[in-house]
Amino acid sequence: MDERPVVPTDPDAEAAQGRVALWLDPDDLRWLRHRCDCDDDTPEDERDRCARVRFRASAALHKAGL
């Protein structure tokens, strides 16, 4: 497997977008991207938030070549 170098997140760029830089272990990201406790009663805004977090976890793994 050809591993690409991991380019750290720029905390200043993230802060400018209202976000906080967060570093997680790849196994934690894998767990997070598959984790969802949403059911039929879960409000739509919570479903959207869950989807965003899982998508970003998956994107972080992809960007890191994992």
Image (cartoon, helix red, strand yellow):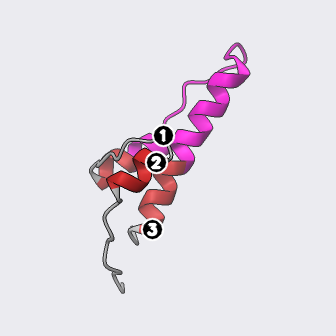
The residue indicated by pointer 2 is 16
Q: Is residue 31 magenta?
A: yes
The residue indicated by pointer 3 is 63
Rendered residue at 51%/58% (across/down)? 59
Of badges 1 and 3, nearer the viewer stands: 1
Task: Indicate the position of residue 57 as horizontal and vertical percent values.
Answer: 46, 49
Taking the image as shown, residue 4 lies to the left or right of residue 16, namely: left
Q: Which residues are magenta?
A: 30-55
Kindly identify the amino acid type of the residue bearing the numbered disc 3: Lys
Evaluate if marks 2 and 1 touch, with contact meaning CB atoms under 8 Å apart: yes
Nearest the viewer among 8 and 14 is 14
The residue indicated by pointer 1 is 18
User: Disc 1 on helix, strand or loop?
Assistant: loop
Q: Is residue 35 magenta?
A: yes
Task: Indicate the position of residue 26 as horizontal and vertical percent values.
Answer: 32, 55
Kindly identify the amino acid type of the residue bearing the numbered disc 1: Gly
Q: Which image quadrant: the N terminus?
A: bottom left
The main secondary structure of the magenta stretch is helix
